Amino acid sequence: MPGHIKLVKGLADPDPTEFLVPSLEVKRADQSKVYDTKKSVWISDPKTEGYREGLLESGDLEDPASKCVVVVGHEKFTHKSTEVGKVNPPKFEKCEDMVNLTFLNDASVFWNLKTRYQARMIHTYSGLFVVVVNPYKRYPLYTHRVCKIYLGKRRNEAPPHLWAIAEGAYRNMLMNTKNNAMLITGESGAGKTENTKKVITYLAMVATGAGKKVEKKVSLEDQIVATNPILESYGNAKTARNDNSSRFGKFIRIHFTQSGKLAGCDIVSYLLEKSRITEQQSVERSYHIFYQLLQPFGDGICTGGLKAACHVSDDIYDYIYVSQGKTKVDSIDDNEELEYTEDAFSVIGFEEWEKMDCYVLTAGVMTCGGVQYIQKGRDEQAELPDCGPDTFAGKAAASFGVDAAAMIKAFCKPRIKVGTEWVTKGQNIEQATGATGGIARAIFDRVFKWLIEKCNDTLIDASLKKANFCAVLDIAGFEIFEYNGFEQISINFVNEKLQQFFNHHMFVVEQEEYVKEGIDWVMVDFGMDLAAAIIMFEKPMGIWAILEEESLFPKATDKSFEEKLKASLGKLPVFLKPASKTDKNAHFGVSHYAGVVNYNVTSWLEKNKDPVNETVVELFKSTSKIQLLVHLWREHPGQPTTAPKDDGKKKKKGGGGKTVSSVYLVSLGELMTTLYSCEPHFVRCLVPNNHKKPGDVEPPLIMHQLTCNGVLEGIRICMRGFPNRMPYHDFKLRYACLGQAEISSSSDNKVAVYALMDKIDFDRERYRLGHTLVFFRAGALAGLEEARDEKVIRWVRFIQGEVLKRIRTRVYVKRRDQRELIKVAQRNFRKYLSMRDWGWFIIIQKTRGTIGLPNPEEELRLLEEKANNTYGEYKAALDLTADLEGQMGSLKDEISAMSKQLSEEQGNVSVYTDRQAKALTVKGEAEVELVKQQAILASEEASRVELAAEVKAHAGSIGAVKKDIEDVELAIIKVEQEKGNRDHTIKTLQDEVTEQDEVINKLNKEKKHLSGTQAKSNEDLMSAEEKVEHLSQVKSQLESTLDQLEGGLDKEKKGRGNLEKAKRKVEGDLKMAQDAVADLERAKKEVESAVAVKETNIHLLSAKLDDEQSLVAKAQKNIKELQGRVEAAEEELEAERQSRAQAERQRSDLAREIDQLSGRLDEAGGATVAQVELNKKRESEIVKLRKDVEEANISSASVLGNMKRKQGDATLEMTEQIDALQKMKAKIDKDKVIIMAEMTDARAATDEVVRAQASQDKSNKALLDQLNGTNKKVDAANLTLGDYGMSKNKIANENGELLRIVGDLDNNLTMLAKSKSALGAQLNDVKALCDNEARERQLLLGKFKNLEHEVDGAKEALDEEASGRDNVLRLVAKAEGDGAVLRQKYEVDAVAKGEELEMTKMKLTARNTEAEATIDNLNAKLTQVEKAKGKIGGEMNEMTVSLDQAQVINAAMERKAKSFDKTITEMKGKVDRLSFDLDVSQKETRNASSELFKIKSAYEESVLQLEEVRRENKTLSNEIKDIMDQITEGGRSIHEIDKIRKRLEAEKLELQSALEEAEATLEQEENKVLRCQMELTLVKTETERRIAEKDEEFAMVRKNQAKALDSMQAALETEAKGKAEALRMKKKLEADAADLGLALEHAIAGNAETQNTIKKYQLQVRDAQAKVDAESQAKSAAADAKVTADRKAAAMQNALEEGRALLETADRQRRSAEQELGDTNENLAELGNVNQSIAAAKRKLESEFHQLGGDLDEMSNEAALSEDKAARAMVDAARLADELRCEQDVAMSLEKDKKLLEAQCKDAGARADEAEVNALKGGRKAMIKMETRIRELESEYDAESRRNGDICKNLRKSERSIKELAFASDEDKKNHERMQALIDQLQGKVKSYKKQIEEAEEIAALNLAKYRQVAGALGAAGADADACEQGAAMRKARARSASLV
């Protein structure tokens, strides 16, 4: 199993990384490999037939004609340049996708696969392929952990894996809603089947998820997986390379729903290897199922064992077909595989007869190999004289359910049609043997196809709608063997078609990517590369057409076929001459894509015809008892004995039989059509070596498979395009180092890459630039890598030099610093030596330590203050401890009081423990007794099993006897069969009812859980109620049909009564006929001479007529039965159609209602689209508010954390005091736990006792049921014994009749001997024969008398037994009468009503489940609708909130606009004042210069006012900005507001420019005023001129001011326009808000309506729930009634057991009655014999009279009918005692007639003697006829005597079994009495235990009450402790505050 690992339960899945991706160590090792870009090459290795790496020394690889010298180690090799391939750079070592390799040669492909495989990575991509190598070892590659890795990932996002392809197929199917197919090919042993299983497992895991599995129901995933054991058993075999090789191709389609859920699966098979059924090679084995049939597990599959049922032996070598090769495989356990196959049959749902027929037919195929024909004399005719049941022919015929002799005759002498007549054709041994093998192969092939059809029927979930499928094609790969025949050319043509499909798809995908990327490319159809070979196969006179044509000619041979092939196809380039080294007899060769294959056409025509013996097929169809075999051959025409009627239609022209190639081509065409409509994915499986060793590689084997699988062909196609590609981002990252400036020169990727490539002189023909990718031809990347490596090596060397420089520089700096420090140290030492004797230096050195020391007095003072402070704190602490110690004393007193109370409570507990100990001792004693009783029960169970085995043995013998009686009881069997069928249907319906009850219970639970959502589904509930009404109507219809059936039953009963009346009438007619016969006797004397001549002919004709009449009667019965069944089936079909039509109508009504609801929902939701858009604008504001709230929450959380820390610090101080109390509490809790554990132990003990009692009650009931069953079987045996006695008497009568006939013949013979003296010699011979026959007859008579003597002894024994029974019968009569009355009431009333109720319940539950399913679906939809409504309502609320906010903002904007208007009016007033001031200033300047100061002050005021205007303008601009911000926030989506904002900004800019001009003019005015002041001091005369200048300047100012005013007016107008626009927008928003309000009101109204309807539905659901509760209560009441009824039934059972005890004594009386009945039966049999003899005489007379005319013919027909009716009446008379008297009267009258007829017979004998004397000439012929008649009578007599002996033996066996059963019943009765006594004892003990348990529970209740009191006291103590702790804390706080003061 490739890549699979066994998982240990409970452990996690192992890490699969090392099996998917190479590790870092491996990558480093690969990168460090020695490599020369120009010289590293591959050459072939003749030793391993692989490749080895060397260095190119000389030669040109680009020149095909040059010679290359390659150095490998110290050796040199010379090769052609075409035989040498370049080695890929180390970057591509263990490449995941081989298409990305720079050099795509065979050696590189092989090396990449080999290194990855040896590194335990078995998956590798090759373009569209994924190559999977068989690891021959378990790897953790297919676990749930790996499934999670690839789930939802693209192919390029994860390492190579089979599941990556499966995931891509699954996701592609879901996204594109297109079917996907995975094509898995490979040789035998490559792991195709295992990989197919893994793909199916992955799809099942992905599609099903982790949903809960329904219990007691086989899931669809399990059924899909369960098909594998069946298909492997029947389709897998051992080959030379693989122990479990699939010998057929399969196309598995896994269907999914629209949502991706698994919906089912179906399988299509191709090319089953049928030749393996009859022949195998020495190292191979046939299909596994043949060897599984002989395994020991089969002994338990069926009664008697599987081998006995299949007629097979234990030795596999008895069967030639399956023992030619290996018979045992070490890696396969056939016994275990048989168990898996059996389980798979049950999981998939095969019926028992289907499974057994399948096994038996398989065994028959295997047995056919032992049929060996012999030659008949000197003729070439084959024959097989011995066809007994123990021979292979007999076993094969038994397996096929046909007669062995007929089957062998059909094989040896088949019937063929010559013209219009059928003739037999003789077969020689070879032909017969071949026909036998052909039939065996055909049967196995049809069984295999039927298994696949059966699996497909069960693997489809009809309840799920199939949208798309993911298919898996598991088919053999291309095959090139030593001998290539018909099978090889078939599979190779399939692979040729698949390779063409791959080439077409691969380069379609490839070229589509080229076109998408926009590179220059001419489309090429690479699928046409293989067209030549495919055309040669498929053309009108191609290989397949010639093969089909030659197969139709009967005289065609392999030689003629070969010659025709060469004549028609010899000139084609792909049709070659044979050149095979392994097969010297090959006839032609074909050039395939994978290579040249030489084929041998031997026996192709025979294999293509695959003929079957049509005579044998007709025998199977018409006479086989195996239903499956008849079903398998139903479509085969066979050889029908009667031509079918035309029925008025034109007769179609009959087509010839289908050949293997025609069926194969049709299926292949369908497969290719399916594949072309799918999205394909390709998987190629490889076998690494032939000896199955992990990690080992055989190069020639792998290269052969790569060639055959098309991997190299795919790489060849890639070489013609651009196989290597790289995104621009990756290209820049890797190759920007070649030209950084060129890469950064342009933002356009193409321009930059072209610049880089042109810089390094890279030919543009070797690459193409797409929109997102850079495409390279094969080998082009190696040139880029070389250039990059040169740069990288140069840079690495530069970096190495720089690093070395840095390292050595650090060493140099360190040593330089050391040298400088040495100099400093030397200098300081010299200074010390010079100053060490200087006095001041000495003083300084000694006083340096005392500098900076503290004052000791100051330190002492500080320490005293600190000590005083600490002593005050210590004293306060002492006081506090004294107070706490006082409080602790009081607490200790309380604790001591509580401990005393606890000790008292524990004393009470000790009393309980004592009682519990007593209870435990009693429990132990009870357990010991229980063990003893269980041992007794086990022994009783063993004895019961033995009795059951004996009963089975007797049942087998009884069954064998019943088979002999079936011919007598046809009518009864028919009724019993109908009853059994109805019981079976009732049982199946009951099972369905139970399943539906479980489903109903689950649905009720779901209803309770989803009661809130179900309240909204009242409309659907109404529809469900309508369905219930419809179901009630269907129920009434079914009841009417049941009444009709009962009426039909009554009619049948009436018809039976009429038949009995007709029988009596016929008996009267018989008497009349006898009188007429007496009258006609006189006429007989006149025509005796003619009667004597034609007597023999009449006997023969009458016998044939009787046989034909019996056959006609049987056929008429069968026709009537079939007509009745057909009518019943048609009625059921019509009712089912009506119910289905009504269901479809209701479904359409529901769909219409759903559409209406969805329309209303769309109308309600359409109005909210605008609101949704506004809501999106408001969400940004909400996000801001949420951020503020979160910041506030964070701040509050920090504050809260600080508070909690403070609180924690305060509580930590109190925990220490609470610990002691908690310890005390823990002790009490432990004691409580111990007490509760003891209580649970006591309860568990009582529960165990109750369970034991229940189990004993169950076993008791089972024993009672078994005893009842055995009693019933005894009664049935007694009835069969009575029937046996009757049949015995009948046979004795027949023997008497035969003896009488023999006596008559002896008399005739003696008379003939006297009269025929001329023929003395012949008469003597006849006499000798007659003497011998007489002796044998006497011997038989003696044996018969002995048997009669034995029967008399048995009768005496029966008399003795019956004498004791008479006494008991009187006592039992009353009990049986009462029981019969009760039983009849129960059976008639309760059972009938129960069955009717169950039937109706079943139907109603079925309909109810359907209705509930629809309700659930509609509920789900309604919940979705409600959720949508809720969302819309929430959005509407948010919209209303946002609307309110917008209105508030609009009001604020209006207020700001009003304030803006006010400011504008103020501004206008200020401007007016400014102009007035300016006029005043001008007048003052004109009057006098003294007023200049006033002008200056006015000017300053105007400046101040301008500043105020500036400020106001700024404020206005800020307000405008705020307004614009608010407008943009309120309606950013409105384009007109944006325009207004732009206008306002432009106006604002204009105002700003006007203000700047005013400021400039004001500055000029200031300068001019200063200038005027200076000029007034200097020159007063120039004032006028300056005033004029001022006038001009003021005029300019006026103009400027006018301009400013105009601009401000324009700004005001624009502001007014903006305000008007804002008002218009406001009105529009108000209108929108009104519309939204209306929509909201409509929605609210609709919501109110829906709420009302919901309330109605809720009320209806509550009513329904109340009804359900009432039904459940009624059900519980019924269950209680059932329990009471069971108790009554148990009491009745006890009474019945007592009655049975009395019945045993009554058996003796029954036996005596049976003896009497036997005597009466004997008398009746004697009378019947007399009646039969008379009937025979009457037949003779009627046959004689038949010759006289048509009247006599009518009389004979009526007599024959009356005889049949009389025979049936005799059977009925044996059971109807009331008709016995009339039969005796008839017998008396018949005795009288007998005497008359005997006298007439004597007269007739005398006349016959005279006629014989007269007819001496014709006496020889008559003698011969009589001799033949005597022989026939002798053979019949022997058969009757044998049958009589068998009946006697069976009688003795049955009597013996009856005695044994009686003894067993006595023993059962005694055991039952013992068990009853034991049960009574156990019940008494159980009662005592119950009393003890009740006392213990009372004690426990008292203890619990005391415990609660203690717990309450403990809680109060805890509260007091908390109060004390709080007081202590307060005291501590006070003490601290006091100490601080």
Image (spheres, rainbow, N blue to C red):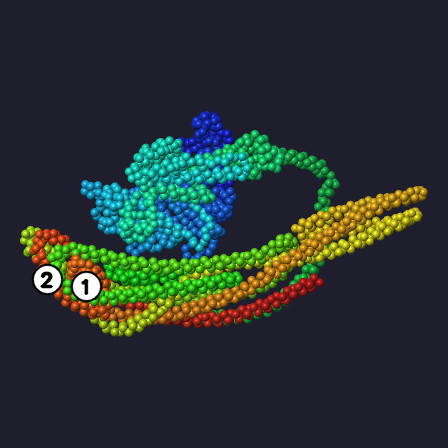
Image quadrant of residue 1292? bottom left
As drawn, the residue found furthest toward the left would be 1317
When the figure is inspected, residue 220 is found, relative to residue 510, above or below; the finding is: below
Identity of the residue drawn at 58% across and 37% down: 732
Quarter of the picture holding the N terminus:
top left
Question: As rendered, which of 1332 and 1039 lies closer to the eye?
Answer: 1039
Quarter of the picture holding the C terminus:
bottom right
- The type of residue carrying mark 1 is Asn
- The type of residue carrying mark 2 is Lys
The residue carrying pointer 2 sits among few (fewer than 14), some (14 to 19) or many (20 or more) residues within 10 Å by Cα, namely few
Spatial CA distance of label 1 from label 2 is 29 Å
Percent coordinates x, y for residue 982 in the rendering? 34, 62
Q: Is residue 1496 visible?
A: yes
Percent coordinates x, y for residue 973 in the rendering? 28, 61
1 or 2: tag closer to the N-terminus: 1
Identity of the residue drawn at 86% across and 46% down: 1594
Q: Which residue is mark 1?
A: 1289
The label shown at residue 1802 is 2
Identity of the residue drawn at 61% across and 66% down: 1925
Secondary structure type for disc 2:
helix
